[in-house]
Amino acid sequence: MANPRVNLAMERENKLHPRNLHTQKYDFEALAMAYPKLSAFVKMNQHEALGIDYSDANAVLCLNQALLLHHYKVADWSVPKGHLCPPIPGRADYIHYIADLLAEGDDSEVPVGTKVKGLDIGTGTSCIYPILGNSIYGWKFVGSEINPEAINNAKMILSSNPTLKKNIKTRFQKSSSHIFKDLIKPDEKFDFTMCNPPFYASLEEANDASDRKVKNLNVNREKKGSTPINTEKGSNFGGVKAELWCPGGETAFIKKMIKESATVKDQCKWFTTLVSNKTHLIEFYQLLQNLKRAEVKTIEMSQGQKISHLLAWRF
């Protein structure tokens, strides 16, 4: 049995992918001009530069709406209150690194257009990965979900954007016990799958992590002389059960994904997922090592101080 070829990415500086449109600081004047509602949240910060209060959920949502409209021509994008509001630059990075994976087998040419088809596992209310993938590279997508509310919101966004609606389809996964089973049709083929799995193993664990994040932010804000976040009013760290946690957390979820991927290995070129905790990678490598002819790659992704890893494998 051949061992998987593990190609660990070189250490990178804390920067986004070179093709990412958001490598520079936000141009708040241009964004507010494109999306006037953002103006109400843009203020001069302590560094005498324009910015928003990132602890304000409404401000963050408005910023995302402005970014999607200004850079990607996506209109009427929103997420219901309490759901995750994804950071656009980091989500775009995942798309760009998948493009690099696909380019390896195409003479280093990044494939564009509707001949490329991706499957987003857990597309969420935002449908953000299919939206960015289609907007940037013109790829087609299927976005799967176990949450009917998420499917409905995603459909509302797509209905307001004809090109997205034409190229992105949503699909309900009836069984929360499976990922690929009964989702991928027998005659269906994908160039890649992608997933931002639930990180935590329980609601308590998710709440504790959110509390720590707010506490750390408040320490930094106090050092800078800024007003602390009022947790009674909530913050921008939203998320419901399926978005934040599942039994066993990301370890159990990704292990299930790896096992099920072997049953549809002839229907997909690359399987990928984000991995929040670097220490979990060893367990995933060991599991993939037991699969015949598995080639594995790990790509380090960074946005500011946050570092995550993209795990990719193919057969």
Image (cartoon, rainbow, N blue to C red):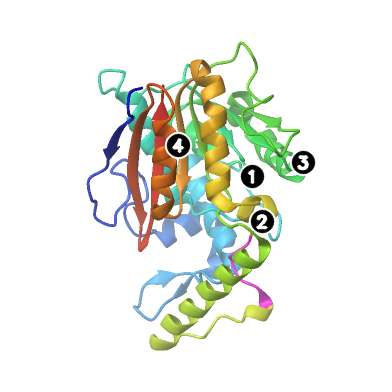
Mark earlier in primary sequence (2, 1) = 2
- Relative image position of residue 79 (x, y in whole percent): 66, 52
Q: Quadrant of the N terminus?
A: top left
User: Residue at image x 66%, y 56%?
Assistant: 83
Q: CA distance from mark 3 to mark 4?
A: 32 Å
Mark 1 Cα shell of 10 Å, populated few (<14), some (14-19), many (≥20): many
Disc 1 target residue: 124
Horizontal side of 297 relative to 200 (left or right) equals left
Range covered by the magenta-colored residues = 233-238
For mark 4, give the secondary structure: helix
Look at label 3 and name its amino acid. Answer: Pro
Amino acid type at mark 1: Gly
Determine which residue is flagged by label 3.
Answer: 148
Residue 83 is labelled as: 2
The mark that comes first in sequence, 3 or 2, is 2
> Judging from the image, what secondary structure is the residue with disc 3 in?
helix
